Amino acid sequence: MKASYNRPAPSKMGFAPAGRGECLHNGVSGWYARLDRTLSDRKSQIGIWTNAWSNSLTARKPVAALLPADWPTLPANLLTDPGHVLDHLLARLDAETDGRSPRGAHPTPPRLADAILKSEMLEPALIQVEEEINPKMPLDALPPGFRAHLEKFNLTSIVEEPNTSQFDQAKEDVENNIRTISGIPLPIADSACGGGLFVARLLRFHSEALKDQDDCVIEDDTRLLLSNLQLVDIDPFIVATAKIRIHLEAVRQNLATIGKAVPGKLSQTEVLEILQQSVKSCDSLQDDWPWQEAPRLVITNPPWLRIKDRFRGHEDGSQLRRELGEKLRELVDESGHRRFSTMRGNVNLYRLFIERGLQILKPGGTLRLIAPDSLLREQSSAPLRELLVKSNSWNNVWAIEEANLLFPGITQGAVVISVSSKGITNSLTIQGPIQRNDLIRKGAGLAPKVQSYELALSQWHDWTRNTWAVPRLPKNTYERKNVLKIIDQMAKNPRLGDSDHWLVRGGDSIRVRVGEIDQNSYSSSIQTWVKSKKSRPFIRGVHFTEENGEIFIHHPAFDSSIPSRAAERQLSMWTGSSDVFHGPRLACQAIVNAKQQRRLRWALIDEGSVLGNSVNHIELSKASEEFLALNNSSLKEGLSWLCGLLNEENLDIWARCWAANNNVNNYELEMLPLIAPNLAISALATIV
């Protein structure tokens, strides 16, 4: 298997599709496209760029001045950080290698990487060392008048009783060589390192923290850091490029030289020799971890790519995908247990990187991983969430809902999870929704204004019926309190798919099904509406309309005033088999627009109508239909009454909180907590 696992993938997992993915500003995206027309070989692009970067550090000239004359002029946005340009070039190479469009390939945003790294650094490690060398004046040595002034403002307790626990821990870690003086835990790993972005940003923090230290301290601490890196990528070319990039970043941060060593800086030879052991080419999912010492911290942004979407551009792609899936499923550890115990459905590679990251960590070590926010709520990720909760300590989630402001072109949210290996989960702290400006380069990596909610284990279990889904919470404080109150109250209600639900009759649980017609497979039998005796309405998602809070079907079969060119008239008539005839049903729009105010849009479907696969519908037993008809004047009236319950505002709030994506999935509809109204409760005593 030759193609790499490393960077997030485009369209299929939330990135923009081909032709729309490059949404960078100020001409940046156009520069990469123009470069492709000038030089199509992407490895040559990368080689030329790294050579120009290296020469610019030696000659002290801008990178742009050392590029070939036929290369397009660099936009101002790309002049300040050569490493970020390299990350884009590598992401585009990775996409092309796999047969995907490079237009939707984007690297990890540096701002996000900085915030994550800063949250894992322990700043007192350096401060403690400095205080031992230059102790501050004790309070008793201050003039009496100044002490009285401090006491007046109640500041003496702050000065006299500092919290020394972190100082002591940092000092002990530094003495044991498991943390740098600059505050970085060691060893630190990345199981899908790509071009080494996280280490590049880490070197910047490292350099800033050591700027006032002696030359020997800087050299020793930098040597310790580089020697304790554990970086892996499956592609040898990308590994070689990462080594070059890390060296150039060290030079840029005044930690190394291009050539011989000078005081306070490591030589080029020594850096590359260290990186030869610290950056390796291997398959982190299938191979053994190539270091004996387990890392204390794994920070990574693995590919957001389903196995079924791999090798799209390969002639034998189907065979390669099948072989990859079989290999991953058959992998076992030394005790004979499967390496990946949570593979289910259309397996996404990022899930496997989560499970693998926890396996390679030292017990008590931390995994920080960037993933799509569907991880928090989709049904197929439930086994993985159970693993995080029951076999480890899932501590924290950063919820980044407007991820398009970080990843250009992305159409879904992102999360950063923090999990401690082999721990015990007591509660989960949800921080967010986080916006771009909330990511900062100090403290815990997040601005103090970011909302936080601690989800207790018992509450979490009751809310989600042991699926450990994480709700999406609004930013507004008032709305958040209201939503949490609604979730807590509604979680006690019976779920629509429960076998003992009040609507169930005859022993058959209520199920939600996809419409009976696949629009792609039966396209020849779906035509523009023409009224005739044989015409049968074909209902699609586009026919669900909302006016004044009411949901109804806007279809030419029921409204002749719809214009001839309107979308509702196109593909709205079924001309295929008429063998299957359905009575009145309740259906829900299966795909919603992200900007749509409501998520649940239930409507009554008249008998004889045919449903497309962009519509979900409730399947009721004959006994349940009789129950509804008996409580109302007819089955149609009973369904209309039930439709009103399903469109209730609080139920829609619930649905938005637990939505995994823009698809209204059958399983989330079956988990709706539909309360039994008084009419139904009284009927339970009289209807069997």
Image (spheres, rainbow, N blue to C red):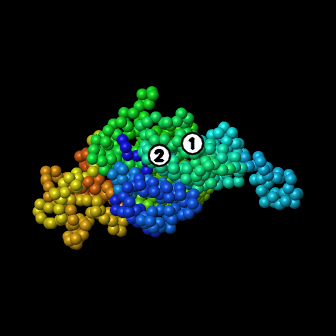
Q: Mark 2: few, some, or many residues within 10 Å (few <14, many ≥20)?
A: many
Residue 474 shows in the view: no
**Left or right of 461: which side holds 669?**
left
Q: Which amino acid type corresponds to the residue marked 2 in the rendered image?
A: Val
Return the residue nearer the eye: 499 or 375: 375
Query: Would residue 195 be seen by someone viewing this image from the given angle?
Result: yes
Q: Secondary structure at mark 1?
A: helix
Tally the marks.
Answer: 2
Q: Which residue is mark 2?
A: 239
- Nearer-the-camera pick, 220 or 500: 220
**Quarter-wise, where is residue 59 in the image?**
bottom right
Residue at screen point 19% across, 57% down = 523
Q: CA distance from mark 1 to mark 2?
A: 14 Å
Residue 62 at what x, y percent from top left?
54, 63
- Residue at 51% in and 65% down: 65
Mark 1: amino acid: Ile
- What residue is shown at x 30% (from left), y 48% (from top)? 314
* Marks 1,2: beta carbons within 8 A: no
Picture coordinates of residue 87, whole percent (x, y): 47, 55
Q: Where is residue 265 shown, x and y percent of the image? A: 64, 50
The answer to which of 546 and 331 lies nearer the viewer is 331
**Residue 263 x/y as whole percent:** 68, 50
* Quarter that holds the C terminus: top left
First in sequence: mark 1 vs mark 2: 2
Which residue position holds label 1? 274
